[in-house]
Amino acid sequence: MSASISTDPTRSSFLSGDPKKMLIGGLWVDAASGKTFPSFNPSTGEVIAEIAEGDAEDANRAVAAARAAFEGPWRRMKPSQRQELLWAVADAIEENYEELQLLEVLEMGSPIGRSRPGKKRSSWEASVLRYFAGWPTKIHGQTIPNSLPGSVFTYTVKEPVGVVAAIVPWNRPISNAVWKIGPVLATGCTMVLKPAEEASLAALRLGELLTEVGVPDGVVNVVTGFGETVGATLTEHHDVDKVSFTGSTAVGQSIVRASAGNLKRLSLELGGKSPDVVFADADLTRAIPGAAMAVFTNSGQVCCAGTRIYAERPIYEQFVEGVSEFAKGLRVGNSLDPETQIGPLVSSEQLERVTGYLELGPEEGARTTAGGHRVMTEDLAKGYFVEPTVFADVEDGMRVARDEIFGPVACILPFDSLDEVSKRANDTNYGLSGGLWTRDIGKAHRLASEMQAGTVWVNGFLQFDPGIPFGGYKMSGWGSEMGEKSLDDYLNTKSVWINSD
Ligand code: ADP
């Protein structure tokens, strides 16, 4: 256990004391305006911390710090030194993982049980950074022959793009930040990280760990505050070379517009309404819990959740019943209770949004076979809890089947043939992921190839590995995170021509 966790399991010592400051140029500073904003525990509605409310001035200072760091000694750091630094950050995350997880549990409500020591995922973010630690020593250009007369030697070099603004959401605070920090440090860029206003604490604690292990001042800056102020300033800023954004498609579109001024490089990981196709020949003992948890994990607050479930007609009723029973058996509770499987939604705004869809489903003609309501038991009434919900007999045109709800709401639709389901699965503006369940390898290959999505899981869902790229087709994004390919988004390629005669 980390020494910095207090004996009270609900408090991290990180939470005690003054409003949390921002990290700019290696210094912990208040917002220039002196303003702060509250961070809430969604299980109870209580304020857990006050956080510096940055605005345009703070964002500008952070960009200047990131620029100065980019042009300073960081530029001359050897690849092996960046490798060692990444490895040290990974070690620090692992050593302090329990505290980081506690902050995440408190600020966004993911159940603590999923992050207990010994659980498989406990060092996921550290493994992502160790993967990226392997890259600085392997990023290189090429020597390419040319056909010019005389003696002309041509080669390419890869150079970091420069200052990166990383704007992230609240649904996985540690992972969201680490997925950006990894390639930034691996490629030699510098960054301004803007965590979501709903969940900034884990990112601030990460900032402390980065400075403790010796990441040079200004290489990673953390500016807290709101999207319309800090976020918008960063995306419009002429001295930001690239924006790496994870969040909603609507904000992604506004970032595309905002970035036009200096034609920033962009990577966008946006929304989804992923199809999950269950064939009659699937192993239902795996497909039922698998498809259910592809929706209910993290209370459905997962961009690639498999929320549009197509079940083949012969097993349709059996499948609906299985998923509904599974949903009813899930334990909804305070995120600090180790027995909790489904925590709250992140905020009162999100609660309002999701309960709106719970009402809309039956109005549109869906049949509610599990859940359907906000949880109002005495112990949970102050938090933002909704029941894991299953809508059966959903039709393709219904809004519950088309909109990204970002809550624990499964929509189940019947289908009759592979050709038909292939078309219907792709009838969406999104293309982040898709799933399918079958024992027939032929069907698996065919639908995996036809699905217009950046990731397809067969007989599984929500699997990730740092070496495997993750990104969206269509309106789910540009570029991908993780894997070798993700690095290119943080690099420029320069061609050098040497005339030597
Ligand atoms: P979600 O729907 O998951 O809350 P958002 O897309 O609203 O996702 O927010 C993701 C991140 O984008 C947050 O850090 C938020 O502050 C930021 N953000 C919101 N609006 C803007 C904007 N106009 N420009 C830049 N960043 C923004």
Image (tube, helix red, strand yellow):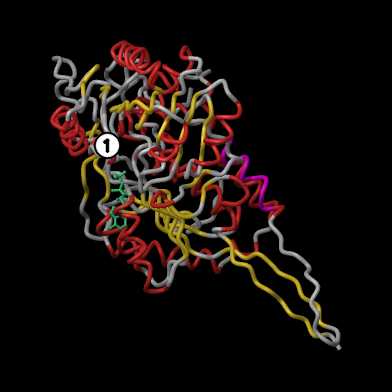
Left or right, 58 with respect to 81, comes to left
> Range of the magenta residues?
126-136
Q: Nearer the viewer, residue 287 or 195?
A: 287
Q: Where does the C terminus fall, quadrant-wise?
A: bottom right
Residue under the point 56% across and 20% down? 439
Q: Based on the displayed image, in which of its 4 quarters is residue 307 positioned?
A: top left
Disc 1 crowd, CA 10 A, few/some/many (<14, 14-19, 20+): many
Residue 131 part of the magenta-drawn span: yes
497, above or below 390, in the image = below
Q: Residue at x 33, y 15 (%)?
A: 317
Mark 1 residue element: loop
Write down the residue under mark 1. 405
Residue 106 visible somewhere in the drawing: yes
Quick check: can you spot residue 340?
no
Residue nearest the observer in this picture, 219 or 153 = 153
204 vs 297: above or below: below
Provide residue 421's location: percent of width, then percent of height: 42, 34
Amino acid bearing label 1: Ile
How many marks the image carries: the answer is: 1
Of residue 251 and residue 195, the one placed in the foreground of this image is 251
Q: Percent position (x, y) of residue 9?
A: 34, 20
Q: Quadrant of residue 40?
A: top left
- Residue 45 is inside the magenta segment: no
Q: Where does the image place residue 128, in percent across and percent down from the top left? A: 57, 39
Instruction: Tell me residue 242's x, y (percent).
Output: 46, 63
Q: Is residue 397 left or right of residue 89?
A: left
* Left or right, 333 with reference to 264: left
Q: Main secondary structure of the magenta part?
A: helix
Disc 1 CB within 8 Å of nearest ligand 1 atom: no
